Amino acid sequence: MNRSDRNLQVLPDSPTRVMGILNITPDSFHDGGRYISPESALDHLRLLIEEGADIIDIGGASSRPGAPVVSPEEEIARITPVLATAVESGLPVSVDTIHGKTAAFALERGASMINDISAFRHDPSLASLTAEHGCTCVLMHMQGTPQTMQLAPFYEDVVQDILEFFKERIDFCLQRGVKEKQIWLDPGFGFGKTVAHNLELLRRLEEFQILGFPLLLGTSNKSTIGAVLDLPSHERMEGTAATLAIGILKGVHCIRFHDVRAMSLVAQMCDTVLGRTSGHDQANQRRNQSS
């Protein structure tokens, strides 16, 4: 089934998409264990929809520094209780995984996107799977793996190094039948990067536009914000909002966040200032109904 047309095409004046995070994991850095039961996961899914999410990103494995690799069987067991409800919502559904087996399971049940922190390096078959299903894919930059990425991150030039990484990964996908219109890029804020690297990424985000692909930014409550503001993860909303606004002003097309209501309002304000075509009406309606 081709899912590439489910509200995932990006035009120059498109409003910023807000991707709501649903981590069904016991150990994610911000919300680990909070939604591990089917009941709590479904409740949070409904809240993300009500608060204005444009895309639902479902993950069954943590990618925090030091997190162990989770088998695709365990991932599938974790995401199964919410997947059908997410798809039935009518919103595009993303599966956050490095495993082809997990991605295939989700795509066959109506998911629209593969969000892979390894950019198809862990499981190269994901490229062929993307081509076969015609779905959108997010290729994220990460230096190392979650087990090693924060041990000693090093770059000659963090932006130029990531640009070269993306060029290689894009070529890898195109050679396996993935179309350019299916590819989104994520520079991987917090993945194999120091605080200084992450701040440099934010300052120079506009340089990634040279590649001509939609950009996704995921800064939600991350440790760099905590380091700058000296705050724990549950008190980083204002810092997160600042990174979001910077990202949108520098050309980001999609933002991935935990606090959907607050961040969708920030995105709407930024989009209005930039004169982007209005596309927030449905999200506003859902938020108002949930108030």
Image (spheres, rainbow, N blue to C red):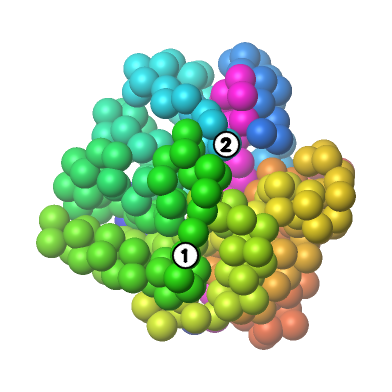
User: Dot 1, how many residues are within 10 Å of its Cα: few (below 14), some (14-19), or many (20+)?
Assistant: few
In the image, residue 184 above or below residue 273:
above
The residue depicted at 37 percent of the width and 78 percent of the height is: 211
Earlier sequence position, callout 1 versus callout 2: 2
Judged left or right of residue 289, residue 152 is: left
Tell me the SS state at disc 2. loop
Q: Is residue 183 above or below residue 32?
A: below
Q: Quadrant of residue 184?
A: bottom left
Q: Mark 2 Cα within 10 Å, few/some/many (few <14, many 20+)?
A: some
Secondary element under disc 1, as helix, strand or loop, is loop
- The kind of residue tagged 1 is Tyr
For image coordinates 62% across by 45% down, the residue present is 20
**Mark 1 sits on what residue?**
155
In reply to whether residue 18 is colored magenta, the answer given is yes
The CA distance from mark 1 to mark 2 is 21 Å
On the picture, is 107 further left or further right than 198?
Answer: left
Give the magenta range.
13-28
- At 67% across and 85% down in the image, what residue appears? 275
State the residue in front, 168 or 247.
168
Q: In which quadrant will I find the N terminus?
A: top left
Q: Position of residue 88 (x, y in %)?
A: 49, 35
Q: Which mark is residue 206?
A: none
Task: Identify residue for label 2.
Answer: 64
